[in-house]
Image (spheres, rainbow, N blue to C red):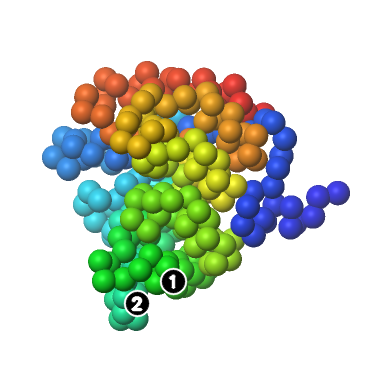
């Protein structure tokens, strides 16, 4: 008989066998130019999700017109009435802050976004570790990240929200450092936001290293296996890695190419949907 603890792993994911439970999503960042220019709204992303048969939205918050209930709650209602889950929001943070005062300021910002996520019903927030100051060592900066992330996770946990630290360069450029930070935080509310396109080299190996700690996965079209060289990512290989590693959750498309996303995103979502079905229970 399964105990409650089987469903509440502290850090690494449990192994569930070769089949996963995968859902697909759109990252709002895929439509960044239109959102910035206001030719597309966050509300427009809901019918886009429906039209492309995806389950969720990962809302990059950079172009939110407001964080007030007057914006958040109607958006939440619209998504619910269309069977679309706003499961994650993505925010900018820089936790590599050398003073207690600056770290407290960063923590306050994290708490603000936790409140926004909770209002939207999102269970996950993508956060950044930040950039190591030129006057500091990486080991020193990592301690600052642990401090902010641990306190942020304590607050996020009170609202049922997971903070996912993304592999996004800077302090999180290497998988080994990311794993070390998450292990030191040692909270069920601190995990990894795995971005398949962000490692600058040896990507498949590094993805495998952080995979056990992933609470969300963002798929990009390209990947870097050799330093500085982009190549088309093998999404089938990546999805198989995820399921064999015990991942269950969302695969969110984050489109960063220059072509019109309204044209280029749908066929990529079709491919992602097929892979989610192939490797799901």
62 relative position to 166: left or right:
left
Viewer-proximal residue among 162 and 50: 162
Classify 53 as above or below 70.
Answer: above
Viewer-proximal residue among 159 and 165: 165
The quadrant where residue 116 appears: bottom left
Tag 2 residue: 104
The circle on residue 158 is none
Classify 207 as above or below 123.
Answer: above
88 relative position to 75: left or right:
right
Q: Tell me what residue is drawn at x 65 percent, y 34 percent.
A: 244
- Front disc: 2 or 1: 1
Across and down, in percent, residue 155 comes to 48, 70
Quarter of the image that includes the C terminus = top right
Among the two numbered marks 2 and 1 on one chain, the one whose residue lies closer to the N terminus:
2
Viewer-proximal residue among 115 and 31: 31
Classify 227 as above or below 273.
Answer: below
Q: Tell me what residue is drawn at x 35 percent, y 45 percent.
A: 59
Label 2 – label 1 distance at C-alpha? 14 Å
102 relative position to 36: left or right:
right
Callout 2: helix, strand or loop? helix
From this viewpoint, which residue is outermost toward the left? 37
Tag 1 residue: 143
Q: Circles 2 and 1: CB distance less than 8 Å?
A: no
Across and down, in percent, residue 220 comes to 38, 33
Across and down, in percent, residue 235 comes to 48, 26
């Amino acid at each position: 008989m399964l105990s409650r603890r089987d469903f509440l792993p502290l850090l690494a994911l449990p192994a569930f066998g070769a089949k996963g439970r995968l859902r697909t999503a759109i990252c709002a960042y895929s439509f960044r130019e239109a959102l910035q220019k206001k030719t597309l709204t966050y509300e427009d992303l809901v019918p886009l999700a429906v039209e492309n048969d995806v389950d969720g939205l990962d809302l990059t918050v950079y172009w939110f017109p407001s964080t007030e209930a007057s914006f958040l709650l109607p958006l939440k209602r619209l998504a619910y009435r269309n069977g679309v889950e706003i499961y994650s929001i993505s925010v900018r943070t820089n936790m590599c802050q050398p003073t207690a005062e600056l770290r407290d300021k960063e923590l306050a910002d994290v708490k603000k976004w936790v409140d926004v996520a909770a209002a939207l019903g999102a269970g996950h927030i993508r956060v950044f570790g930040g950039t190591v100051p030129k006057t500091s060592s990486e080991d020193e900066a990592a301690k600052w990240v642990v401090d902010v992330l641990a306190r942020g996770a304590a607050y996020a946990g009170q609202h049922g929200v997971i903070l996912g630290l993304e592999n996004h360069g800077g302090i999180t450029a290497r998988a080994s450092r990311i794993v070390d930070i998450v292990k030191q935080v040692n909270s069920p509310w601190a995990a990894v936001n795995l971005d398949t396109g962000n490692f600058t080299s040896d990507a498949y190996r590094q993805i495998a290293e952080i995979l056990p700690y992933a609470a969300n996965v963002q798929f990009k079209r390209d990947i870097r296996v050799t330093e500085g060289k982009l190549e088309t990512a093998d999404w089938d290989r990546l999805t198989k890695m995820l399921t064999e590693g015990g991942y269950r959750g969302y695969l969110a498309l984050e489109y960063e190419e220059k072509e019109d996303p309204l044209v280029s995103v749908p066929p990529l979502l079709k491919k992602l949907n097929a892979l989610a079905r192939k490797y799901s229970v």
